[in-house]
Amino acid sequence: MRISELAATTDVAVPTIKYYLREGLLPEGVRTAATQAEYGPRHIERLRVIRALVAAGVSVAEIRKVVTALDAPPAGAYDLLGVAHAAVTPAAPDDIDTGSAEALYERLGGRPGTCEPRLLGGLAVALATVEQAGFTVPSDVMDEYVASARRIAEAEIAGIPGDSLESAVRYVVLGTVLTEPLQLALRRAAQQIVSSDRFSGGV
């Protein structure tokens, strides 16, 4: 298909596609003339990954890291998905104390010293925010947070598609970013239901 057809198929404007080509985010098409090229399913998949990353607020530099890993995949899917996770996880301050975050990571079942730095930093920031507010999460509630997070992660990872690396990365990116507001909304809805049952007899 020509670039205009690629644009129509993916709902990405031609100038945007050309920008991705110039930046090296999208592989070149097969040249059929000096000013024309043919594009195929690989370009459609790659555009979907790029757009998912853009929608997640990921910078061009971080997107380049993801597509570079797609073009020269690491030895295993675990490492590739780690690149995708890192791309959508904001960097934490360099001087943040990660001791409590490391301990919590181990409670999730992680091996000591194996958490990706950005994920560990993000966990540390979240814990620090709670602490700075002067709030302590009750131990039984934290136990439930850990157990629930593990169960959710197991279900999500089990759903990663195996048909292509692009599909797997897109799943991780969208599943990480787009479902977080859904999880928060579900939690708040559940809190309303449970508080109603406890304090007003379900009325």
Image (cartoon, rainbow, N blue to C red):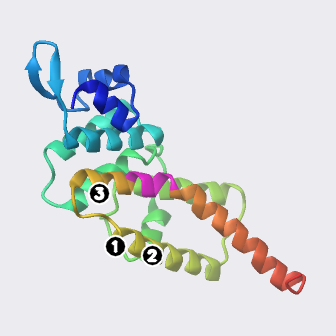
Q: Position of residue 82 (x, y in %)?
A: 30, 55
Q: Residue under label 1, please give it.
A: 158
Q: Disc 3, disc 2: CB below 8 Å?
A: no
The residue positioned 67% from the left and 77% from the top of the image is 138
Q: Amino acid at mark 2?
A: Arg
Judged by its main secondary structure, the magenta piece is: helix
| Element marked by disc 2 | helix
Q: What segment carries the magenta color?
A: 173-178
Nearer the observer, 151 or 54: 54
The number of numbered discs placed on residues in the rendered structure image is 3
Q: Amino acid at mark 1?
A: Ala
Q: CA distance from mark 2 to mark 1?
A: 12 Å
> In the figure, residue 22 lies in which quadrant?
top left
Residue 143 is left or right of residue 56, and the answer is right
Residues packed near mark 2 inside 10 Å, few (<14), some (14 to 19) or many (20 plus)? some
Residue 175 included in the magenta stretch of the image: yes
Q: CA distance from mark 3 to mark 2?
A: 20 Å
Circle on res. 52 = none
State whether residue 97 appears in this view: no
Quadrant placement of the C terminus:
bottom right
Say which label, 2 or 1, has the lower sequence index: 2
Residue 178 is left or right of residue 81, and the answer is right
Q: Position of residue 26 (x, y in %)?
A: 24, 32
Q: Amino acid at mark 3?
A: Ala
Q: CA distance from mark 1 to mark 3?
A: 11 Å
Nearer the observer, 140 or 151: 151
Circle on res. 150 = 2
Q: Residue under label 3, please give it.
A: 168
Residue 76 included in the magenta stretch of the image: no
